[in-house]
Amino acid sequence: MTSYEALDPGDLRPRLPSPLRPAADERFTRHGVRLLLKRDDLIHPELVGNKWRKLMPNLRAAAAAGRRTLVTFGGAYSNHLRATAAAGRLLGFDTVGVVRGEELAGRPLNPSLARCAADGMRLCFVDRAAYRDKADPAAVRALLAREGLEPGSVQVVPEGGSNALAVGGCADLGRELRGAAGTVAVACGTGGTLAGLAAGLGSGQRALGFPVLRGGFLEREIRELQRAAFGGPAGEWRLDDRFHFGGFARTSPALDAFAEDFEDRHGFAVERLYVAKMLYGLTVLAEEGHFPRGTTVAAVITGGPEPRETPAPPPQRGPGSQPGPEPEPGPQSGRRPGP
């Protein structure tokens, strides 16, 4: 069982800083643009990418406060729920996932939610109206009471893990990339990674975010996250919202074809709902001449494909049972067609 007073995520042997690798690709080189891949998906085999950077500050805060239960929110295919469940198993926290969609309670679990359950997460399905109140303190208190949870023993982590603690953790990503590229691109769900990334970059660097949801609300959210984390605006950043492909969890045959081609070119499995959209957007921008010749662009690979099969029972809980990061997956592993 975890010593909550001395939680050391280093026991899980993360690969930090994550690798930064050149990616020779004529779609960029013919425009005089150099592409780098920041492989945050290789930080840890279960707490992948930006989820490590977001969750660890929240886990440290929970440990310092003696809170042994993590409660968080997500949709049916949430990478954040899956990472939180894995963190609970690996570090000895109880986890509760509030899942959008009450109708899912009576259906077989998809592979993502099955992985959460196998890692010990208690799944609580709520209707979409109730889910929209996830940031309302009174609604959260009512939810905790309904689930039999004492507020003092619970660390509530917002959807996507994005809060001031998480944004501070993601600033490390920017610091690791200082001086490496003029533009650093990342896919955006809740905006926490971009908010921290931009703050950590150096002078003359800019973060470029590709929202995967429709609605145009993300700019406001990012500004609020930076205000909460840093007291005000931090770093240079902008959004390009043309590449959401219809919204979250939506893809298209063109996006799938692009992702498969990128896999074949560069030898790793491309996650469809975030990473593929960001990479697709970068190729379009390069073709449009958005990047001046001589520009270096770093693309943050924030995670890998979701699991495809119902998982086996989880290994023993607690630190010491988890091996170090696995070898990088091959280009055929973990492919998932769009829904």
Image: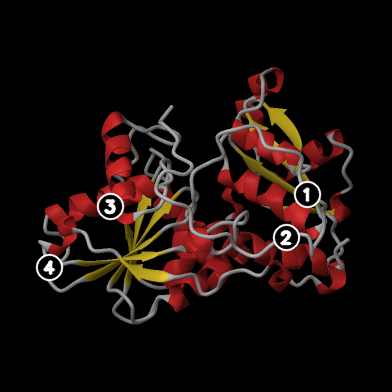
**CA gap, disc 4 and disc 1:** 48 Å
- Secondary structure at badge 4 equals loop
Q: Where does label 3 land, which residue?
A: 265
Residue 63 location, quadrant:
bottom right
| CB under 8 Å between discs 1 and 2 | yes
Residue 10 location, quadrant:
bottom right
Binning the other alpha carbons within 10 Å of mark 4 as few (below 14), some (14 to 19) or many (20 upward) gives: some
The spot of residue 254 in percent (x, y) is 26, 34
- Secondary structure at badge 1 equals loop
Please state which amino acid type lies under the numbered disc 3.
Arg
| CB under 8 Å between discs 3 and 4 | no
**CA gap, disc 3 and disc 2:** 32 Å
Nearest to N terminus: mark 1 or mark 3: 3
Q: Is residue 37 visible?
A: yes
Q: Which mark is residue 315?
A: 1
Binning the other alpha carbons within 10 Å of mark 1 as few (below 14), some (14 to 19) or many (20 upward) gives: few
The foreground one among 263 and 178 is 263
Q: Where does label 4 land, which residue?
A: 32
Q: Is residue 200 above or below residue 94?
A: below
**CA gap, disc 4 and disc 2:** 43 Å
**CA gap, disc 3 and disc 4:** 19 Å
The spot of residue 18 in percent (x, y) is 49, 70
Q: Which mark is residue 118?
A: none
In the image, 267: left or right of 153?
Answer: left
- Of badges 4 and 2, nearer the viewer stands 2
- Of badges 3 and 4, nearer the viewer stands 3
Q: Where does label 2 land, which residue?
A: 322
